[in-house]
Image (cartoon, rainbow, N blue to C red):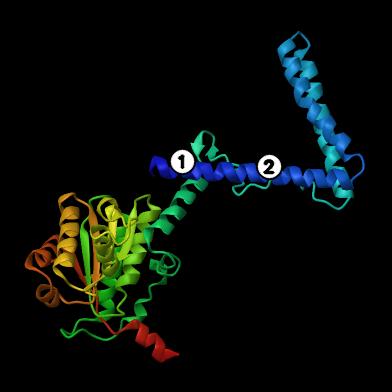
């Protein structure tokens, strides 16, 4: 977790805590107008704090006894207030702040340790900024159904066994991911689950606290072109170079030009040289990649990446036929 992400998470908690306190004050004022005697009771409760403070500053031999008496008085006033609220049809805690995190009360800490709500906030921001979007809700390992992988490959191997192996490989890859993990090349026809598998890996890696960027090959090239030719002053391809895991989806759908080939090579080569992990999905076969791309791109993908072949029928078509 970066300092910026953590600071942002704490800033969000501060805003929630202040809003919870303000909402509680508004409810308290509402109750004081509706319930006779509540305003006076609240004043008596509030007066206990200053009394305890003065007592602590004065000290004296009878400090313990007086302090205990004030605490007892405070408890009695609170009980009286609760009874008054309940008698008038309100929950006893109606005017208390309602925090988004009941565990840390939106402070971000439990026993001097960072609360899980801070980590969850950072993860949610990572989901949003990764580019995976709604895919993170639906495309998880739990929603992968290997029963759609039926029949045999051209070589006679079981499609289900092959894809069960790929699924297990991807699960372990995500589970044990650390920066510098091997890069993956997922190849196979459209609708075989490549994007689903890559998204599931991305979600798990984000949950482990690492930065993930998911983008189609077309959008990556467009971003580089926009920056290079000044089409979009806000275009920033730096995220592709720095994230712990970059997922390049649908390589081969982009329009190939001298510029696009150079941009893709430089990006992939930079990540290899700097020990950064990349997942590439493509509908192209290795032979088609060799034909459509320059030798130096093909050599990087075939030599530096672990190739995971996806087989079987188009799952989207299978689901459509079953309707």
- Can you see residue 3? yes
User: Which of the labelled discs sits on residue 25, or is there none?
Assistant: none
Residue 233 image position (x, y, % from top left):
33, 56
User: Which of the labelled discs sits on residue 7, or is there none?
Assistant: 1
Furthest toward the top, the residue is 61
Which quadrant holds the C terminus?
Answer: bottom left
Residue 185 drawn above or below residue 145:
above
Front-most of residues 48 and 252: 252
Front-most of residues 103 and 286: 286
Residue 186 image position (x, y, % from top left):
23, 70
Secondary element under disc 2, as helix, strand or loop, is: helix
User: What residue does disc 2 label?
Assistant: 21
The quarter holding residue 59 reads top right
Residue shown at the point (85%, 49%) measured from the top left: 86
Indicate left or right for 276 with 10 as reference: left
Q: Are marks 2 and 1 in contact (CB under 8 Å)?
A: no
Residue shown at the point (29%, 72%) measured from the top left: 194
């Amino acid at each position: 977790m970066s300092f910026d992400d953590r600071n942002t998470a704490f800033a969000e908690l501060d805003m929630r805590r202040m809003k919870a306190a303000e909402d509680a004050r508004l409810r308290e004022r509402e109750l004081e107008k509706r319930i006779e005697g509540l305003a006076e009771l609240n004043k008596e409760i509030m007066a206990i704090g200053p009394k305890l403070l003065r007592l602590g500053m004065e000290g004296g031999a009878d400090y313990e006894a007086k302090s205990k008496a004030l605490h007892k008085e405070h408890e009695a006033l609170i009980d009286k207030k609760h009874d008054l609220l309940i008698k008038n049809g309100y929950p006893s805690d109606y005017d208390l702040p309602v925090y988004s995190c009941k565990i840390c009360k939106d402070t971000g800490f439990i026993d001097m340790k960072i609360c899980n709500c801070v980590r969850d906030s950072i993860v949610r921001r990572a989901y949003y900024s990764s580019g995976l979007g709604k895919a993170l809700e639906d495309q998880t390992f739990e929603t992968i159904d290997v029963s759609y992988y039926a029949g045999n490959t051209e070589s006679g191997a079981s499609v289900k066994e092959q894809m069960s192996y790929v699924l297990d490989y991807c699960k372990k890859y995500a589970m044990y991911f650390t920066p510098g993990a091997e890069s993956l090349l997922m190849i196979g026809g459209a609708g075989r689950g490549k994007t689903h598998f890559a998204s599931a890996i991305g979600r798990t890696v984000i949950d482990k606290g690492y930065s993930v960027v998911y983008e189609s090959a077309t959008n990556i090239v467009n971003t580089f072109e926009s920056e290079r030719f000044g089409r979009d002053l806000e275009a920033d391809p730096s995220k592709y170079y720095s994230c712990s895991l970059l997922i390049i989806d649908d390589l081969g759908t982009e329009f190939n030009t001298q510029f696009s080939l150079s941009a893709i090579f430089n990006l992939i080569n930079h990540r290899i040289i700097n020990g950064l992990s990349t997942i590439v999905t493509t509908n192209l076969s290795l032979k088609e990649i060799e034909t459509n791309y320059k030798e130096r791109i093909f050599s990087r993908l075939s030599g530096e990446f672990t190739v995971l072949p996806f087989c079987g029928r188009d799952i989207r078509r299978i689901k459509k036929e079953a309707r």
